[in-house]
Image (spheres, rainbow, N blue to C red):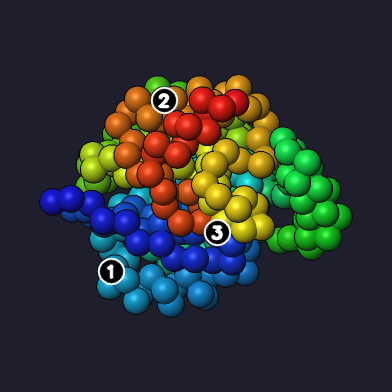
Amino acid sequence: MVATIQAIPLGIDNVYVVKDRRVILVDGGQPGKFASFARRLRETGVVTRDIGLIVATHGHWDHIGCLAEMKQHTGAPLAMHAADRSSIERPNPVMPPGVTPWGRFLSALLTATVIPWLKIPAATVDVVVPDEGMSLEPYGVGGQILHTPGHTPGSVSIVLESGDAIVGDLAMNRIPLRLHPGLPIFAEDMAQVKRSIEKVLAAGAKRIYPAHGKPFHADELEAAIAAM
């Protein structure tokens, strides 16, 4: 069986539903969007008892906002890297630093206008993703989770046996963040971002699924890091 990926848009974010022998969910979207998520999940035909795992690609507010409610609704465990787990276990939303002029402007704007109003319910991380990564086979999905820091210290990506790769904010492809597929406009360490993208490509990624925007061919991401 080849895994399939369906996107559930929540604001400017995608929550991904990966269907294989079982189902995993990737990311938790923006706070306040759970009702929309639950309705869209029903439309995919997923039965909650088939969900084996929820994976958070990293700990920024727009990726963890509904995780607590998703855990309660599905009964599935939550997986996250140790370096980002405090962001959901003790939520304190912050904006990441911009690495482009537009990224710096957006970071400052959202810090002033959005961040002060955010309320994110806390949730417990049940599965800690190790630095060496982990297989998704025990959760019914052919693929692996890779530790891909750079956007945040605990960022992770999922690379499926099909070559589909769900990368969180290791790449972006949506207005107003980017006009075209490419590198993140926010990051803690762009040198690490490059190394992490190389790791994802070396793991066999052929098609990139960003948290923000539509999927695109991995060649475009390879070209983006070559131009750094």
Query: What residue lies at 62% left-to-right and 58% top-to-bottom?
Result: 175
| Residue 149 visible in image | no
Residue drawn at x 41%, y 57% as measured from the top left: 16
Q: Quadrant of the C terminus?
A: top right
Within 10 Å of disc 3 (Cα), the crowding (few <14, some 14-19, many 20+) is many
Mark 1 against mark 3, which lies toward the viewer?
3
User: Where does label 1 land, which residue?
Assistant: 47
Residue 13, which numbered label?
3
Instruction: Return the mark for residue 199.
Output: 2
Q: Position of residue 5 (x, y in %)?
A: 32, 56
SS state under label 3 = strand
Number of residues whose C-alpha sits closer than 10 Å to that of mark 1, classed few (under 14), some (14–19) or many (20 or more): few
Tell me whether circle 1 and circle 2 mark residues in contact (CB < 8 Å): no
Q: Is residue 30 left or right of residue 197?
A: right
Which comes sooner in the sequence, label 1 or label 2?
1
* Residue at point 38%, 44% (across, down): 217
- Report how far apart the C-alphas of labels 1 and 2 lie in the structure: 33 Å
Q: Nearer the viewer, mark 1 or mark 2?
A: 2
Q: Earlier in the sequence, mark 1 or mark 3?
A: 3
User: Does residue 189 appear in this view?
Assistant: yes
Q: Residue at x 73, y 38 (%)?
A: 100
Q: Is residue 166 left or right of residue 174?
A: left
Rendering coords of residue 104 (x, y %)? 79, 42
